[in-house]
Image (spheres, grey):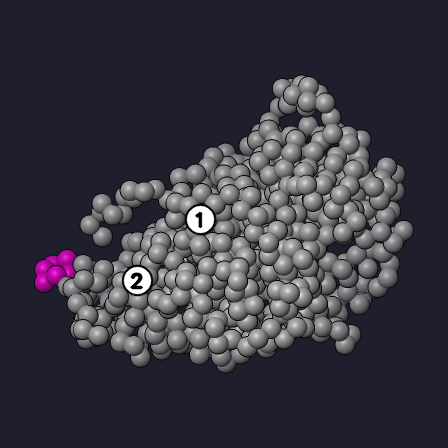
Amino acid sequence: MPDPNYMDLRSARWFAPHDLTGFVHRTAIQAEGFSRFAIKDRPVIGIANSWSELVNCNIHFKLLAEAVKRGVLMAGGLPLEFPTISLGESLMKPSAMQFRNLMAMDVEESIRAYPLDAIVLLGGCDKTVPAQLMGAASADIPTIMLTGGPQEPAHFRGKQLGVGTDTWKYADELRAGKITEADFDELESAAKPSAGHCSEMGTASTMTSLVEALGMCLPGSASIPAVDSRRGQAAEATGRRAVEMALSQGPKPSEILTKEAFDNAITLLMAVGGSTNAVVHLLALARRVGYELQLDRFHEISQRTPRIVNVRPSGEYLVKQLFEVGGIPTVLKALDPLLNRDAITVTGESLEKGYIHAPEADGVVVSSLEAPFDASGGIAVVRGSLAPNGAVIKRSAASKDLLQHKGSAIVFDDIYDLGRRIDDPDLDITEDSVLVLRNSGPVGAPGMPEWGMLPIPQKLLRRGIRDIVRISDARMSGTAFGTTVLHVSPEAAVGGPLAIVRDGDPIVLDVENQRLDLDLPEEEIEARLAELKLPEPKYRRGYGRLFLDHVNQAHEGCDFDFLKGLPDEEPQRLPY
Ligand code: FES
Ligand code: MG
């Protein structure tokens, strides 16, 4: 390799000039105790760290950052770590999703404003990963991600638990009177036994797996458990690779995040039975790089992609066990005929190169394409008079006998209405009813919280019923399950037809034929829509106001309209 020309580095624009500005920039680094030697002729690698004591899933990121720095130093770069806001799924209200775009802006502007030649993203908990990817995609300097890894499996009464999945199940058992409060308290302290993101294929593990299929992290790094020493080793390797990427000035996110890469990610999403939240995040990320990915692409790929991964909530095991049989490279290898093998990754090599030597599918946690766990992918797209711009359903986690269903609506105007009435003994409900929750979308809730797995009314639980059809403009936790239609677009709060459904209206769900209809005469629907009054906005100032004024609907990924990638972006016209 010829000697890199350090004057070509982005950071050289700050540090190289022998003038007063260069002096000021260099002293800012030396003020931290770095010598002049540390900034002379070497790339600066930014480490965007989403560590926070408010985000338990990312609590080990200080240690990971140290390992990244070690790698950067070994390769001759200068690592500079910086914090960004972090998004904790469990604690943030009304929903971490409301702040995904804020974090993306923080990441983008931090990268752009500082003298960085390449960036390492440290993300883990659900929304931190898409937020970082979106920000870095818009900033578009060489970027490599290191995800935090899944937490250790929890055990309760001799059984291995999926954190989210089993919490919901035991919560229903408690409401049904099958376990005691004391049992539930014991479960609470056992539920999260280590650092790391949720241990099943919830949103976090789905997104971190997709990072690998997109080509944005080192092959094999996504599913290493959070506390496994191999994650530290991967962090070190990530740091080393970041220096190489800085010196070769690529590949950049815009070179990696191609249509082919998105198809690979969607294929993996279906194969792992992953979270519906990934749909929203991929739609948003694609738009950052100027690719108008459509909801229907998910359905098309879902139709041709079997589910070959047996991890909860769609299957039986946890991500730790997936790692033990070969991790994401083994899954990608099994999916090989369905992938764009030549898609370029952060390694500078093809996706194929990263999985070609992976172990073969073991047949238990990962199957072959020929003997899958489900013939088609986990997520289906439906549309119709109740969802003109589409909605999604995770069919791999739904009851098969409800995927084609007609029933009368029981409507809840918002989450409070639901809370008040759901367990009312007088609720006029049968197992054929369809529960509708509205005003829980991006604008209505706001922030499109994970309210979509509406609780089964106690009345039905007592009769042993554990699933009925549920429809909303909300999202659902990646660890949730049931016959739940989500992301109805447009949402009720902006005048979508969900707003005009009344108790007793017939609703038809037909997943096979991709339909979701309010089975009323068109004139009736039109007449009701014409009379509709939109709710008052929930915020009048601050970030909430910005959010309400600019958030896109679910079928476009809920990004802000002004953050979409443009062919001729300003930064290219600015000196830095
Ligand atoms: Fe952070 Fe599940 S709560 S990943
Ligand atoms: Mg979640």
Residue 48 placement (x, y as % from top left): 39, 62
**90 horizontally vs 432: left or right:** left
Question: Magenta region: which residues?
Answer: 17-25
Does the rendering let one see residue 82? Answer: no
Residue visible at 70% across and 67% down in the picture = 316
Q: Nearer the viewer, residue 80 or 271?
A: 271
Q: Which numbered dot is residue 254?
A: none
| Residue drawn at the location 88% of the way across and 38% of the way down | 426
Q: Measuring from the top left, give residue 373's x and y in whole percent.
A: 69, 63
Q: Which residue is identified by label 1?
A: 286
The verdict on residue 24 being magenta is yes
Q: Farthest right residue?
A: 463
364 sits left or right of 66 in the view: right
At label 1, which amino acid type do we have? Ala
Residue 519 in which image quadrant: top right
The residue pinned by badge 2 equals 250
Task: In the displayed orientation, state which residue is furthest to the left.
Answer: 18
Is most of the magenta stretch helix, strand or loop? helix
Q: Quadrant of residue 77?
A: bottom left
* Labels 2 & 1 near each other (Cβ < 8 A): no
**Which comes sooner in the sequence, label 2 or label 1?**
2
